[in-house]
Amino acid sequence: MAGSGSSRKKVIVRKFSRDWHSGYVDPQGFAHDGQLELLDMTGKVLAMTLQDVKMMCFVREFPTGDTIDPERLVRRNFTSRPRTPGLWIRMRMRDGDELEGLASNDLSFLEPEGIQFTPPDMRSNTQRIFVPRSALQSVEIVAVIHPSNRRKLDLNEQERLFAS
């Protein structure tokens, strides 16, 4: 597994079979060649086929005790338009589940292995989510969220530059 111990992030990997694994991943190189590499809680490296993975949640804390929902994704949709700049996306998984999030409006959206995004509820245990492309039935871009004040200032500056 690539990366040093300090660069590894806590994750919970949810599979389509409904079981899940907790452990650590290198945030820059966890998915490649159709596999997801996870360093589990016992120190063993697990290679999971991305085809079996529904989502991987980057979490603040690992679950304690026997829990059915370790990701604690209470809200799966935005209740109002997000304020943070990015792509507001709505995904439908192969199993019919729907999930919304805010992805970066850059080339990282085109990563071949999957999509990373911020979930609707930033106060939950889950900070970011990775969904493999193989887990998706569809992806819809609901809106492109622009930085509100900066965009207006840039347009005004541009108008002044070209005013005669």
Image (spheres, grey):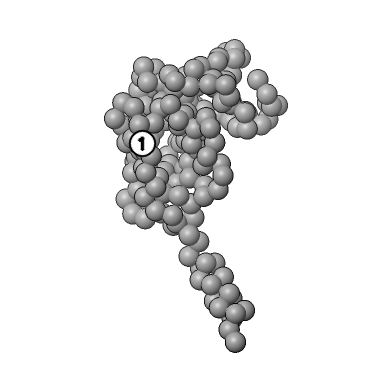
Residue nearest the viewer, comparing 94 with 56: 94
Q: Which quarter of the figure has residue 18?
A: top left
| Mark 1 lies on residue | 138
Residue nearest the viewer, comparing 66 with 106: 106
Taking 94 as reference, is 22 left or right?
right
Q: Is residue 102 above or below residue 5?
A: below
Q: Residue at x 35, y 22 (%)?
A: 68
Amino acid type assigned to the residue bearing label 1 in the image: Ser
Crowd around label 1: few <14 · some 14–19 · many ≥20 (10 Å): few
Residue nearest the viewer, comparing 107 with 68: 107
Q: Is residue 162 above or below residue 116?
A: below
Taking 162 as reference, is 95 left or right?
left
Residue at the extreme bottom: 164
Q: Residue at x 58, y 24 (%)?
A: 32
Marks counted in the figure total: 1
Residue at the extreme right: 4
Residue 143 location (% of width, % of height): 39, 53
Q: Residue at x 45, y 46 (%)?
A: 102
Residue 90 location (% of width, % of height): 36, 42
